[in-house]
Amino acid sequence: MASAIKKNEGFGAAQLILALSIGILVVVVAVPVLLIFLNAFWADGKFNVQDVLRVLSEPDTYQALMNSLIIAVGTTIGSTVVGTFFAWLVTRTDLPYKRFMKGMFLVPFMLPSFIGALAWKMLLSPRAGYINRFFMDTFGFEEPLFNIYSFTGIILVEIMYLFPFVFIQVCGALERMDPTLEESARISGAGLFTITRKITIPLVMPSILSGALLIMLYSMAHFGTVAVLGIENGIFNIPTLIYERIHQSAGSFASIRTGTVLASVLVFSAALILWLQNKILGKGRYQIIAGKSFRPMELKLRGLRYPLLAFCLAYIGFTIVLPTVVIFLVGGLTTYGLPFTAEHLSLNNYKFILFDYQVTRDAIVNSVTLGLAAALITMSAGVMISYVIVKMRVRGKGILEFLGMLPFSVPGSVIALGVILAWSGKLGINLYNTVWIILVAYIARYMAFSIKANSAALEQVHDSLVEAARACGASMGQALRDIVLPLVRPGMFAAFFLIFLPALRELTVSIMLYSPTTRTIGVAIYTLNEDGETVMSAALAGIALILIVSGQLFINRLTRKKAGR
Amino acid sequence: MRTISGILLLSLCMFMGAASPALSAEKLIVYTSMKESLIGKLKAQFEKKYPDISMDYQSAGAGKLMAKIAAERQSGTVLADVLWTSEVPDFYNLKKEGVLEPYTSSEIGNVLNPFKDFDGSFTAARLGTLGIGYNKKFIKETPKAWSDLTTKPFKGAFGIANPSLSGTSYMSVALLAEKFGWEFFEALRKNGAKIGKGSGQVIDDTASGELVASLAVDYIINDKIKKGAPMALAYPPEMLVVPSPVAIIKNTPNLGAAKKFVDFLLSKEAQTIIAGEGTLPVRTDVEIPAAFNMPTPAEAMKRAIPIDYQSLMEKKEANVKRFNDIMQGK
């Protein structure tokens, strides 16, 4: 097909699309990242590793690195255990209401973890948290039950909202796994324990590991939870330290320097994690067989069926329902610290936030428009770039493949820092303090999602379809419009919402880039909480939850309709 | 396809709409450490009075605002037209660096002036006071002296906002250290006092019971008391009175609007709003609602711990470090 392009549209068109695609990725992603490396490793006009090591060995920096590592490792291990266990429970046992439970375990995906952190702060802050208070008041506990402002607290909250990464992967693997492998082992006389150890676990191991690595990647570069629960007790990780440094020391050279060095560490760790993941997935690819027609044997839970169901329900209630309820209740309070009684609860805060409070109104408008614009632009660029990567054979495509991989490995706080370096006037264009700089950062951040979704859709469109159209006399443009575009539209749709919904609740990037009039929903929730406007912050978080959940339901309906057709 | 293009078109329109501000009106951007409850009302009144001026404000801790201004100065343009915080040393610094546009308001004759070396670079627009804000559920007796904070009822649960984030907090720490020596903070530390985040958060923590008391800014706690929070504000005899100066940033393209704002802020109507929010006005002809139980501006100035701005400015870094070291037990 590539030769067809060359012959008929001329050498120019293919090259042009390639150049354009490379251009977009270079400007949006590569330049900011390069500037970070340059800033970190290039001091006084020469390559300088000593200085980098000096920054890394400063007590604060070193501590932040260690904290990031502790939190990431703890979260990864915890989420892997929780995710694998629940995945096994809903796929391989006769747990009642399995389908429903599976859906419920995916709900935490929708909840932004910093809103979760906010809720847990209200529930478990040492002296005032509602749960701690309850135990201290009712049972006369001298000490609070649990202090959420701790490593354990941060890790537990992150586990609650990140375990679905492993859950989804493992569920998929367990469902796709060929049951005959297990059956033959059973026929040969192996017991359940042996089968699990020798057949099942090795088969799903790649999925478990790749889910775990995703969590590690995410948790290391995660801002919200640590910012809400850690900073108060002096627990910093890399993104929160970057944020504090840049905000407190006036964006001075030294603080930007520290920021870029820390960001480089994040990029390298992310690259390492992704490399590991590729290796693991590459090895595991042949072992999982995509047989869907057999039902795998189910473990009979017998007497444990209902206790385990109760456990799952309690888990959901404790990690999803309870925090959500608290957010909405606190959001309804006249002022924080009052009891939840009818006289103190009203919808006034919600009304104030939606109609009268300029900060939050701006924030909602900003987030929705930024989300739509970023989703739109990123989706379109993603289609073009994926088309080049998947379908075209032109020289120089390798560069594009590399650049296309880059956004996967660049964490949000790094993008924000890079965008500040690239777009605050040093290269001639100054977008700092405008809504555009956040848009550019969003595009860079979400390009990976778009390329992934669109590539997957394009890979399913066989070249022969286009060739057939061309053979019947259609022009290249016609073939694209009438054959390719309709076929990849679901992928484009998916990409659009994969970007729009996360952008709606984005915090890590926008917290570094906001200005008076360009607060996003995430920033507004965070700063209101920081300013001691706890009830307003909770009310806005409640509204954000409603927006996100209804958006998600809308997508579910759309995709179900698509699947039905 | 129609759905997609519909969404695309819609988002494009909305984005354009959001990105291009109204061009017709005069603009004014105020950076202030005043919280929403105060600045929001002032903005509404100001825009009612001057419908042609569209005012925006950034409300954040003084430390953050200064960081922002410093970053903006590096990049060439300061976004703010007017700065109004409670960190007086910042204003002296900015004046020295030539960043402030001198302007003597026509209202100057009607206001109290706490600055001996007043030259129009900045003008006090409010007299902020700080006292002991306490949760009535846990503290039954009204605290009478600063030294009460080192006693048992306050053990482990007295909070001071982080002085590197909050201007009022820094001023208070410096003044208390001046008056009672650093031993006072060592004694506080021994009694388990904590550094909180911003000046708003320590008060919400007091309301919730996370802290039993905190060093509280008047209008922030009074706003929450008005809404029913179980708290009260007590002033020991040696009062902390921190003026909040307002200043115009040099080279602002909106000089006219900025001057109008400063005049407005010192006018009787704005000062009445300020008094109505539970903080002290700079005008003596403004009534303070009796419910707040606050001293008059003149009395507050008499009871106030005197402030040597020059030394506060020079010693800021050292003071903050000393405070943090003591409070973190280093």
Image (cartoon, coloured by chain):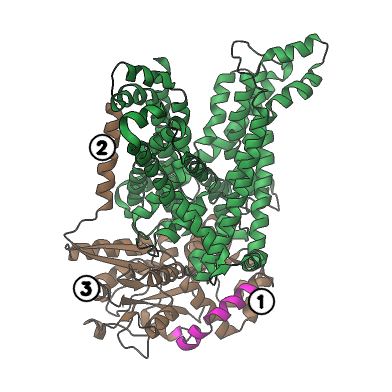
Which secondary structure lies at badge 2?
helix
Q: CA distance from mark 3 to mark 2?
A: 41 Å
Marks 1 and 3, how far apart in space?
46 Å
Residue at 55% x, 53% y is: A228
Q: Decide which of tag 1 and tag 2 comes sooner along the chain.
A: 2
Q: What colour is chain A? A: green
Q: Is residue A340 left or right of residue A361?
A: right
Q: Which residues are magenta?
A: B303-325
Which residue corresponds to the image point at 16% horizontal and 59% vertical from the top-left?
Answer: B24
Q: Residue B55: x and y, percent?
A: 26, 63
What residue is shown with label 3? B260
Task: Judge from the rendering whether residue A398 lies leftward or rightward of residue B6; answer left or right.
Answer: right
Number of numbered callouts drawn: 3
- A185 up-or-down from B155: above or below: above
Q: On the image, numbered disc 2 is attached to which residue?
A: B9
Q: Mark 1 vs mark 2: same chain?
A: yes
* Chain displayed in brown: B
Residue for point 50% across, 50% down: A412
- Mark 2 residue type: Leu
